[in-house]
Amino acid sequence: MLRCVFVRERSTTISSKIFVGNINFETTKEELVQLLSEIGPVTDAYLPTDRATGKPRGFAFVEFSTPEEAAEAIEKFNNYELSGRRLRVNPAEDRPRPRAPRSPAPQRFSSDFSSGGGGSDWSRPAKPKGSRRGLRGKKRSL
């Protein structure tokens, strides 16, 4: 039996965006940018926050102007201690693209309002109630 296995390889080229993890929750965006700008100019920094609480989530995405600067920042700041925590710095992985939205299922319209199917023209036809055994018994009795 022949089995086909598809392996997704990581790209060997580094982008200019890095992931900075294990950040202290009190660290601000300005402090992080100031630290990382020792390597080169930071073009963008994003510290996501929790939707419910609004507090930082403990990681950031930082973009440099060139991939070489990003590689140097990874080399220099991985395991660097900032505010009592060791930073984890890696190349940022691209998010998988979202799937194309599915087309909605066709709607069934009922022109007969007396069918007893819930009273709405948007509802689906009503299923018979009861178990299969009960339905078989009803069929036999007819």
Image (cartoon, rainbow, N blue to C red):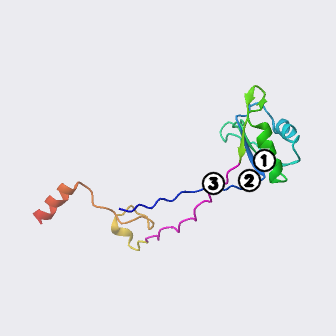
Residue 113: quarter of image: bottom left
Which residue is pictured at 69% across the width and 55% down the height? 12
Q: Residues within 10 Å of mark 1 (few under 14, many from 20)?
A: many
Give the magenta part as a residue range.
Answer: 92-108
Q: Residue furthest left?
A: 141
Image quadrant occupied by the N terminus: bottom left
Q: Secondary structure at mark 2?
A: loop
Tell me the residue at 53%/69% (across/down). Answer: 103
Mark 3: few/some/many CA within 10 Å (<14, 14-19, 20+)? few
Who's the residue at 81% across and 39% down the image?
29
Tell me: 60 left or right of 141.
right
Report the number of discs.
Answer: 3
Q: Amino acid at mark 3?
A: Arg
Q: Are marks 2 and 1 in contact (CB under 8 Å)?
A: yes
Is any part of residue 44 visible from this angle? no
Question: In the structure shown, which secondary structural element does the residue marked by tag 1 occupy?
Answer: helix
Q: Pointer 1: what residue? A: 71
Which mark is drawn over residue 10? 3
Q: Earlier in the sequence, mark 2 or mark 1?
A: 2
Residue type, mark 1 in image: Ala
Q: Is residue 68 left or right of residue 10?
A: right
Per the image, the residue denoted by label 2 is 14
| Residue 127 highlighted magenta (yes or no) | no
